[in-house]
Image (cartoon, coloured by chain):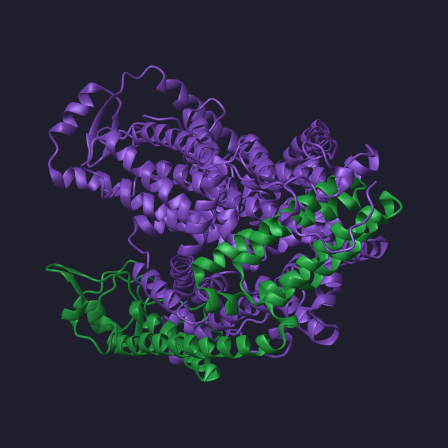
Chain colours: A purple, B green
């Protein structure tokens, strides 16, 4: 071993490794191999955990309307299994395992926000149906797109703009806790324990145990505490706190910037709604019932304005960040020129992934574009396409409905159907004769039929089918890119991903292009987009974690691209399984009659019927976007994103999140920022893990109980 | 001035957002039948129940509120007359037109206010950056540049001291201890100086600096992780790599 130099060395002293005991190219390669990062055990662990989490959380999402992230759970389990059981997991190995597991899990939210809407609209999906596999294919395409599109932006968001990605930071704190000393591990475990204890009465009623609601206080339910009611606030002013340690932890890690999220919530729920109520700017039926005012305000103006602000804020953010994006792309492009590829996936790989995903999306869109608009013959009124028991709701019993559906479906096989194209739609007829009769109908007669199908012509109605599918796929790809950036920005700044808002905009966009009757196509692109953007956000969180523990981005990106297609398939199969079980038990696939009401899909269904009925407040989206863009003119270009995001999130979520932000600020003031980060972040990460793990365990038990 | 700028922005966001509510909640008393026409023979439609039925149970208790006209009703002159007669002021319509938006002027004022407020904040922040820059020139330790200098010193000190240490355990502990300072405090100082750095360097040069610095930081983070995992050799390789990057990083952020 060489003597230590007397003067500090300079980097230009030697191009070889400077430390005497680490020199030698062969040894370097050998040693790098010895530091475990990508291993078979981590990969297999990730696949198993990812699939289990995906199925359990898909079920939970269909039941309660929102999902939980899998990164923190996978990180803790990864340590338990790889390090505790197999006695070999390194920080980077566990990081890679959680990256893959969460990539497999995350796509479920994209599926459950969109696909069940087809069941709710009476469009049947079975494992043997073409639509099922097309949507799955589109979702897999979306998954690849989401992961591929966001890769070049890692540099911009994580390294240049330094977005916090609170969950990513929390996971890094988990991964680093054993190396950071036993005290930090204890703090992390304390966070997990406190979160689990606090969250138990909120989640355990699902298993029939005692819950917060059993206390008997009218202001306390299992999910939330109505402080406004307790303090005697007027009903139109909501002050509700969600009983969610996760939100508290995420708020803490976000810190001061999260206060702007709270500000947006205050603007929506404590200013706009009460002021509109006080000024009489609501319909009389709402003014007569103050309890309905918050819900009305949310649906009539807060949500569209919020989504608009978010879009405008994000566009301004992108505009301001263009030099950083350019620099990031330059850096990624240069990675391809380095021998061995540098530490980033080169643009070539991304271009191939994007092209591949585009082809999948185009194929799915073109096949769905040829799907008939109608299930009933316009001329005879007879069924021409597959039915379910839900189509016979007027019959008395479930058995009768099922029998009728079976009989109709059996009769369809003997039909010699014919089709016609009209206003960009394919119309299906029971026979060539009825199709000929349709040819003789005048415009008014046809308009009546099209109105009965809620089918207004889209902007691309005059395009040939292939060109239409091509344009929709191009727009879909471009929109996925933009929405991915928006979602990643939101997640980076706040930890919230406004998936439902983006899904809503996507469905509206595709219905405007393809026509209001093109529901399957809209849901197909919507599913692809939702999966893509959730993965974009998840990947950024994981890459943020990777940055903090020193993982090589290229390895994380490659592994994520390899496993990313598994998630949509698992989520689709789980949705189908649950729908079939529900049909068997209640005769309907989803909805209030079942234990899995699919609330987000119900909301999307309302949007679809809203578009069909011309009820969308497009101007509010535009005005919101203008305000959101202008908000970014000041010192912080992403201000519109933060304010807009919180305008359409439920107040109970952002209130608890805001409390976390305030606690972080107080602790920073009291003990200093460094202390608040060093000790507070592991505790906050524990809060995230505690709630997530308990929720998943309970969901798995409930799922297991059937 | 910054506070005034933010106050203007806050007020304008509230008034701007509030004014948009009236874009679809139209005052039926204020506008003529003609202004509700959306084509030659069609009028705007209700997007929520309009008006209120005065109904009571036999025992005098009120029914749940019911609208006079259901959602989707076309606002024909007869319907409008009936709503006006019932004293209804605002109804929510499906179709938007500037001609029926009575608070458009407030929205316009808010847009102007937001622009002015944003400019004011930006100008003030620029001045603050210049002042902070001057202050940091006098006391560089708390500045991003000072933090970077300290990080580079830590890397150099590790390169210098590690070979002389007795065991790998000592080396790994030293790496963890010294890089802890970087991870906890110094990176935070650089990140918190973002606005100042952008003001000083411009977005493009700031991006170049952060690109180089982040690569250095990530390599050091890897050294920390490897040390925590007990893989000393990997940590040392990372330190070598980080050390080789220091000149480049320094060149991207002039003192």
Left or right placement of residue B238 versus residue A402 in this view? right
Q: Is residue A649 above or below residue A40?
A: below
Occupied quadrant, residue A653: bottom right
Q: Position of residue A446 (x, y in %)?
A: 17, 37
Q: Is residue A27 visible?
A: yes
The quadrant the C terminus of chain B occupies is: bottom right
Left or right placement of residue A3 versus residue A557 in this view? right
Occupied quadrant, residue A259: bottom right
Q: Position of residue A194 (x, y in %)?
A: 78, 58
Q: Residue at x 52, y 70 (%)?
A: B196
Q: Residue at x 73, y 29 (%)?
A: A41
The quadrant the N terminus of chain B occupies is: bottom left
Of residues A585 and A233, which is closer to you in this image?
Answer: A233
Q: Residue at x 64, y 60 (%)?
A: B187
Q: Position of residue A60 (x, y in %)?
A: 62, 44
Q: Is residue A275 above or below residue A17?
A: below
Occupied quadrant, residue B85: bottom left
Q: Position of residue B146 (x, y in %)?
A: 63, 67
Left or right placement of residue A12 versus residue A442 in this view? right
Of residues A288 and A55, which is closer to you in this image?
Answer: A55
Q: Is residue B1 above or below residue A136?
A: below
């Amino acid at each position: 071993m060489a003597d230590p130099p007397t003067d500090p060395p300079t980097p230009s002293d030697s191009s070889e490794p400077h430390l005497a005991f680490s020199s030698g190219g062969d040894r370097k390669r050998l040693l790098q191999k010895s530091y475990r990062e990508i291993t078979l055990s981590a990969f297999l662990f990730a696949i198993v955990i990812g699939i289990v989490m995906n199925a359990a959380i898909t079920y939970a999402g269909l039941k309660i309307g929102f999902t939980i992230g899998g990164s923190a759970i996978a990180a803790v389990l990864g340590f338990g299994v790889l390090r505790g059981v197999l006695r070999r997991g390194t920080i980077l190995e566990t990081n890679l395992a959680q990256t893959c597991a969460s990539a497999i899990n995350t796509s479920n939210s994209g599926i459950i926000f969109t696909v069940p809407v087809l069941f709710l609209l009476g469009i049947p999906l079975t494992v043997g149906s073409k639509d099922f596999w097309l949507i799955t294919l589109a979702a897999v395409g979306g998954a690849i797109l989401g992961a591929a599109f966001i890769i070049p932006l890692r540099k911009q968001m994580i390294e240049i703009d330094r977005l916090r990605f609170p969950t990513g930071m929390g996971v890094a704190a988990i991964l680093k806790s054993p190396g950071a000393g036993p005290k930090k591990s204890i703090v992390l475990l304390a966070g997990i324990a406190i979160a689990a204890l606090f969250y138990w009465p909120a989640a355990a009623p699902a298993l029939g145990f005692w819950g917060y609601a059993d206390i008997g206080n009218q202001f306390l339910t299992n999910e939330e505490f109505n402080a406004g009611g307790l303090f005697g606030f007027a009903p139109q002013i909501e002050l509700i706190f969600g009983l969610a340690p996760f939100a508290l932890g995420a708020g803490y890690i976000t810190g001061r910037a999260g206060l702007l999220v709270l500000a947006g919530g205050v603007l929506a729920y404590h200013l706009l709604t009460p002021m509109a109520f006080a000024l009489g700017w609501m319909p009389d039926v709402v003014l007569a019932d103050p309890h309905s005012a918050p819900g009305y305000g949310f649906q009539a103006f807060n949500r569209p304005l919020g989504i608009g602000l978010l879009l405008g804020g994000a566009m301004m953010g992108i505009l301001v960040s263009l030099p950083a994006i350019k620099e990031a792309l330059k850096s990624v492009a240069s990675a391809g020129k380095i021998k061995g590829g540098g530490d980033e996936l080169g643009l070539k790989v991304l271009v191939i992934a994007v092209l591949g995903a585009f082809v999948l999306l185009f194929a799915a869109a073109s096949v769905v574009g040829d799907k008939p608009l109608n299930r009933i013959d316009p001329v005879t009124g007879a069924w021409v396409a597959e039915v379910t028991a839900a189509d016979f709701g007027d019959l008395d019993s479930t058995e009768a409905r099922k029998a009728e559906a079976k009989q109709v479906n059996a009769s369809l096989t003997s039909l010699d159907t014919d089709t016609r194209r009209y206003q960009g739609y394919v119309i299906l007829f029971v026979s060539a004769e009825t199709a000929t009769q349709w040819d003789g109908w005048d415009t008014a007669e046809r308009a009546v039929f099209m109105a009965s199908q809620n089918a207004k012509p889209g902007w691309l109605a005059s395009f040939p089918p292939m060109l239409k599918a091509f344009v929709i796929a191009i727009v879909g790809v471009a929109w996925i890119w933009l929405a991915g950036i928006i979602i990643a920005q939101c997640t980076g700044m706040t930890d919230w991903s406004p998936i439902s808002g983006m899904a809503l905009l996507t469905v509206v966009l595709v219905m405007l292009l393809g026509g209001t009757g093109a529901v399957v196509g809209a849901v197909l692109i919507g599913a692809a987009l939702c999966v893509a953007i959730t993965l974009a956000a998840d990947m950024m969180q994981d890459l943020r974690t990777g940055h903090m523990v020193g993982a090589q981005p290229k390895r994380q990106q490659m592994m994520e691209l390899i496993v990313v297609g598994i998630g949509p398939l698992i989520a689709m199969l789980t949705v189908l399984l649950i729908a079939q079980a529900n049909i068997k038990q209640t005769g309907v696939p989803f909805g209030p009659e079942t234990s899995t009401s699919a609330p987000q899909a119900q909301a999307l269904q309302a949007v679809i019927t809203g578009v069909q009925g011309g009820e969308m407040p497009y101007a509010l989206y535009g005005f919101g976007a203008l305000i959101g863009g202008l908000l970014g003119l000041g010192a912080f270009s992403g201000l519109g994103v933060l304010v807009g995001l919180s305008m359409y999130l439920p107040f109970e979520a952002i209130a608890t999140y805001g409390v976390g932000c305030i606690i972080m600020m107080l602790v920073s003031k009291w003990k200093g920022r460094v202390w608040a980060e060093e000790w507070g972040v592991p505790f906050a990460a524990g809060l995230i893990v505690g709630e997530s793990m308990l929720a998943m365990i309970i969901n798995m038990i409930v799922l297991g109980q059937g | 001035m910054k506070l005034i700028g933010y106050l203007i922005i806050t007020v304008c966001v509230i008034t701007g957002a509030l004014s948009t509510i009236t874009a679809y909640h139209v005052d039926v008393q204020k506008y003529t039948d003609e202004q509700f026409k959306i084509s030659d023979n069609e009028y705007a439609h209700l997007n929520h129940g309009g008006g209120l039925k005065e109904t009571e149970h036999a025992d005098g208790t009120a029914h749940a509120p019911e609208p006079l006209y259901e959602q989707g009703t076309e606002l024909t002159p007869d319907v409008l007359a009936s709503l006006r007669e019932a004293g209804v002021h605002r109804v929510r319509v499906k179709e938007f037109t500037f001609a029926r938006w009575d608070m458009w002027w407030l929205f316009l004022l808010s847009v102007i206010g937001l622009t002015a407020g944003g400019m004011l904040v930006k100008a003030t922040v620029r001045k603050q950056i210049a002042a902070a820059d001057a202050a940091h020139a006098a006391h560089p330790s708390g500045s991003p540049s000072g933090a970077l200098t300290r990080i580079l010193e830590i890397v150099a000190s590790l390169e210098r001291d590690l070979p002389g240490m007795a065991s790998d355990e000592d080396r790994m502990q030293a790496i963890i201890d010294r890089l802890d300072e970087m991870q906890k405090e110094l990176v935070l100082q650089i990140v918190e100086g973002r606005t100042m750095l952008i003001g000083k360097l411009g977005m493009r040069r700031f991006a170049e600096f952060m690109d180089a610095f982040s690569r250095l930081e990530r390599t050091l983070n890897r050294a920390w992780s490897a040390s925590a995992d007990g893989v000393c050799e990997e940590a040392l390789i990372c330190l070598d790599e980080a050390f080789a990057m220091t000149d480049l990083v320094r060149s991207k952020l002039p003192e």
